[in-house]
């Protein structure tokens, strides 16, 4: 036990944004490190920033955080609609009003006697953490998102598991596509970044990958599919990111949800791509939308290890007084980076990324060929 910590500390811990494989591994790592190394009390805040605003929490115990390393989801619950500065409040039956409820969150932080708050989440969570830093809250961030779009870290936990799900799905679609001589379109998550589509598509041997970062044309997609048919390959696999833009630059938006800070719910481009391919080539085409399958289930070994390393580092930061930082992986080392650096810009796929060049070399089309 670290005897230099004279006053037992109270560390708050929440998981924000969408669920993600590896969250429980982080909870375990933060709690065990804070409790065992620093004799700290760890307060688990329920359902992300919603619980912080509404005053829902419980003290975590060693018993509660044992045996959860392999579990998907989060034992604390989470929400992507709990931004304290953009909080949905029902002011009348069926009528929602967006309000600034940050004062409630600050009140609860004080009421609970928290010395620091560890926030585990993606871009939205880190933006909220940065706002709390500006109000004097002692924040530590842990980068979580299957989208892998957080700057300042080489990779976020949850991404590897999501890519593994995409790869397995493509392996399965490959067999049915070849059996029925069809074009199979698979739509994957990622928001405005194409990392899941790129990495999953390459690992699954897709013939066409459509990304938000690379504009595509229908003609180039048709040409790739027709070329395969001409050469006796009577099926094709197409992997499309949900945030890929249609020719002309339009996004495909499934719905708008004012309760979210970013109201747009992307989705549906897979159906449009399948419809256009069938109309443009005459080839029978089917679409599979993986959706939340990519977020669920047990984390891969890589994500369990990464989440553990990040959680341990975050606990050390919170208990040793290093605030306004996010734990990050760089060159296989876990370091601290300013939260502001992590949210300075989205980490999107560079068009000249080495994996894109490798994919082109083995014949993958990105729909941009002239």
Image (cartoon, grey):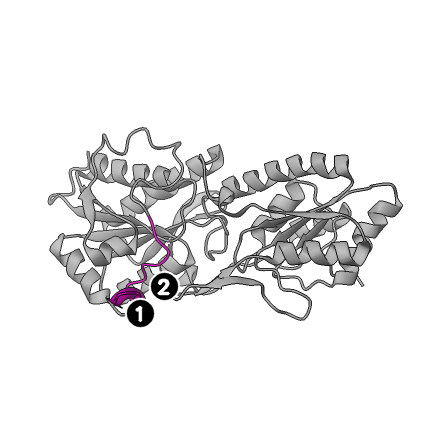
The magenta stretch spans residue 80: yes
Q: Which mark is residue 194?
A: none
Q: Where residue 224 sits: x, y (%)? A: 80, 52
Q: Which mark is residue 98?
A: 1
Q: Is 115 left, or right, of 73 in this rendering?
A: left
Which element carries disc 1, helix, strand or loop?
Answer: strand
Q: Is 95 left, or right, of 352 in this rendering?
A: left
Q: Residue at x 41, y 51 (%)?
A: 18
- On screen, residue 284 above or below 304: below
- Mark 2 — residue? 259
Q: Are marks 1 and 2 in contact (CB under 8 Å)?
A: yes
Looking at the rendering, in which quadrant would you find the N terminus?
top left
Q: Residue furthest front?
A: 93
Is residue 60 visible in this depiction of the protein?
yes
| Mark 2 surroundings within 10 Å by alpha-carbon count, few (fewer than 14), some (14 through 19), many (20 or more) | some
Q: Is 57 left, or right, of 225 in this rendering?
A: left
Q: Residue at x 49, y 46 (%)?
A: 292
So how many labels did they put on this image?
Answer: 2
The residues colored magenta run 78-95
Separation of marks 1 and 2 at Cα, in angstroms: 7 Å
């Amino acid at each position: 036990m670290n005897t230099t910590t004279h006053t037992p500390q109270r560390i708050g811990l929440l998981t924000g944004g969408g669920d993600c494989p590896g969250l429980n591994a982080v909870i375990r790592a933060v709690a065990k490190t804070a409790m065992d190394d620093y004799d700290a009390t760890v307060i688990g805040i329920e359902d992300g920033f919603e619980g912080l605003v509404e005053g829902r929490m419980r003290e975590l115990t060693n018993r509660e955080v044992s045996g959860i390393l392999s579990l998907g989801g989060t034992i604390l619950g989470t929400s992507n609609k709990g931004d304290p500065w953009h909080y949905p409040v029902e002011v009348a039956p069926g009528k929602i009003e967006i309000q600034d409820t940050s004062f409630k969150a600050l009140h609860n932080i004080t009421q609970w006697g928290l010395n620091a708050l560890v926030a585990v989440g993606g871009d939205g969570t880190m933006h909220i953490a940065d706002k709390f830093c500006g109000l004097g809250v002692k924040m530590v961030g842990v980068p979580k998102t299957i989208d892998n779009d957080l700057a300042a870290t080489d990779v976020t936990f949850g991404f590897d598991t999501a890519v593994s799900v995409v790869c397995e799905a493509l392996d399965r679609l490959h067999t049915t596509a070849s059996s029925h001589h069809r074009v199979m379109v698979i739509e994957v998550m990622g928001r405005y970044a194409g990392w899941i589509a790129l990495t999953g598509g390459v690992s699954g041997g897709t013939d066409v990958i459509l990304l938000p970062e690379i504009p595509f044309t229908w003609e180039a997609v048709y040409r790739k599919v027709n070329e395969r048919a001409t050469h006796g390959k009577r099926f094709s696999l197409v992997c499309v990111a949900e945030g890929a833009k249609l020719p002309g630059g339009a996004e495909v938006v499934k719905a708008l949800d004012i309760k979210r800070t970013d109201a747009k719910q992307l989705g549906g481009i897979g159906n449009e791509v399948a419809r256009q391919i069938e109309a443009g080539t005459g080839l029978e085409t089917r679409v599979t939308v993986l959706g939340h399958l990519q977020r669920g289930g047990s984390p891969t070994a890589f994500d369990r290890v990464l989440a553990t390393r990040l959680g341990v580092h975050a606990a050390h930061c919170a208990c040793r007084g290093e605030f306004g930082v996010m734990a990050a992986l760089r060159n296989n080392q876990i370091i601290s980076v300013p939260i502001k650096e992590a949210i300075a810009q989205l980490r999107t796929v560079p068009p000249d990324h080495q994996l894109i060049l490798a994919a082109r070399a083995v014949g993958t089309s990105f729909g941009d060929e002239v």
